[in-house]
Amino acid sequence: MSTTPPAVVPQSVRNATLAVWAMLGLLVFRVILTFAFADDLLDAYIGDNEARKALPRELVEAAAPSYSGVAIGVLIIGAVLAFAALNLGKGARWARVVTVVFAALSLLGTVASLLAPTIAVLLIINILVGLLAVAVIVLVFSGEANRFFAAK
């Protein structure tokens, strides 16, 4: 029987895990709001564009980005990220890689959301997700986190 003590999870890894869960909560909230405010998103897409205003709403809706499709894709990505978050505290290197990749993708999504027409509440959520993604990346590459993952 081994008497080696369990590895202590560094605070930076615990904080990164909490930040990932906060990101996931915001992503789920954003998906819900995307469906709830579908008409408002379409109005934001139309915006001040005179050509879009002149078209029937059905045609504009067909040409608009697939907000619901993106929202469903975010949920699928979120499920993978949740699985990685469950394994960060165990020191799983793959979980750190998956977390960093998905955090980087979230950052790209944040930048894209700044360029795309949207509504204010979704823009605020996207910015918060981007800030959390930066925090996750920084935290999982801190010195103590590097030592923790290297020891596993």
Image (tube, rainbow, N blue to C red):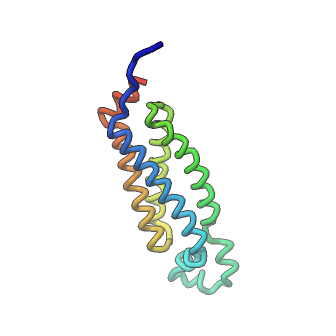
Q: Residue furthest top?
A: 1
Name the foreground residue: 103 vs 111.
103
Q: Position of residue 1 (x, y in %)?
A: 47, 13
Residue at the location (43% across, 57% down)? 129
Q: Left or right of 132: which side holds 51?
A: right
The quadrant where residue 72 appears: bottom right
Question: Is 44 located above or below residue 13 in the figure?
Answer: below
**Total labels drawn:** 0
User: Percent position (x, y) of residue 12?
Assistant: 33, 40
- Foreground residue among 149 and 1: 1
Query: For the point 50% across and 53% down, which residue is it?
Result: 24
Res 36 quadrant in image: bottom right
Relative to residue 130, is residue 118 depicted above or below? Answer: below
In percent of width and height, residue 136 lies at: 39, 46
Q: Residue at x 62, y 71 (%)?
A: 64
Point out the image quarter for the C terminus.
top left
Whether 7 is drawn above or below 47: the answer is above
Q: Which residue is outermost to the left?
A: 143
Q: Position of residue 26 (x, y in %)?
A: 47, 59
The residue that appears at 49% across and 67% down in the rendered structure is: 116
Quick check: 59 left or right of 122? right
Q: Nearer the viewer, residue 119 or 132?
A: 132
